[in-house]
Image: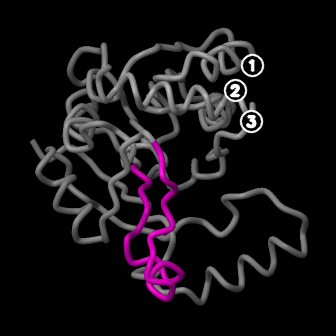
Amino acid sequence: MTTLERSRGFYRERYRAAPGAMRDYRLYLPLLGGVTQGRVLDVGCGEGHFLEAAAEAGLEPTGVEIVPEALLLARASQPDAGWVLAAGEDLPFPDETFDAVTCLGTLEHFVDPPGGASEVARVLKPSGRALIVVPNLRFLWWTLTGSPGTEQQDASELLLDRSGWTALLERAGLEVLSVEAEPWYSKPAPAWKALVRKAIWSLLPLRWTYQLAFLCRRSR
């Protein structure tokens, strides 16, 4: 069994145990650098929540995912979007196809993260934008506890800090335009919890935030 097959199997089993548990990134759309029209590809799209928001904003959505069960739900909610079962390291699209490419909380789980980042750069138009959200090795809680908090799993996971991720993306052919902290509103919650989360997140320096959102363009 290959590493990719083990990874796919892990996420399929986890998804079957808790349908609907894939993280909802639809509220990350404002971080996409002002892209408001054209084709958008979400690599590791899960159930398609982000692409649902993208379609409502006027973008033409396409999603790639390795978990068939997630794609079934995504297709049911958005039958007119393009849904592809494929690995992020081997995107079945020509060069310079998309006006925007997102990879939200998934690149770190790729069997080959540098290869996945290179694929993002390859399919992105020269004028396009890529939004890549990845975990921060220097997250304050992990720093205080001395543990990155990753579960023991039969799937890959890469943890780097801001400089490490920047170097990886640049080697893959992406130029980092800006880096932002994970939005405080990334998890829908009751109003009082949202206010508490906003207060905590607003005080947390970027170097200690949980996830980093990299806005990029092609560098070559």
Name which quarter of the figure residue 178 lies in.
bottom left
**Which secondary structure, mark 3?**
loop
Q: Name the residue under label 2.
A: 16
Q: Is residue 135 magenta?
A: yes
Type of residue at label 1?
A: Ser
Q: Name the residue under label 3.
A: 18
Name which quarter of the figure residue 141 lies in.
bottom right
Name which quarter of the figure residue 177 lies in.
bottom left
Q: Position of residue 217 (x, y in %)?
A: 26, 47
Q: Is residue 208 left or right of residue 119?
A: right
Q: Does the magenta stretch include residue 138?
A: yes
Type of residue at label 2?
A: Arg
What's the residue at 47%, 46% (across, down)?
153
- Note whether 140 is above or below 118 in the view shown: below
- Note whether 15 is above or below 146 in the view shown: above
Q: How crowded is mark 2: few (under 14 residues within 10 Å), some or many (20 or more)?
A: few
Q: What stretch is highlighted in magenta?
A: 132-153
What's the residue at 19%, 55% (across, down)?
168
Q: Where is residue 209 in the image (x, y as percent from the top left)?
A: 49, 76
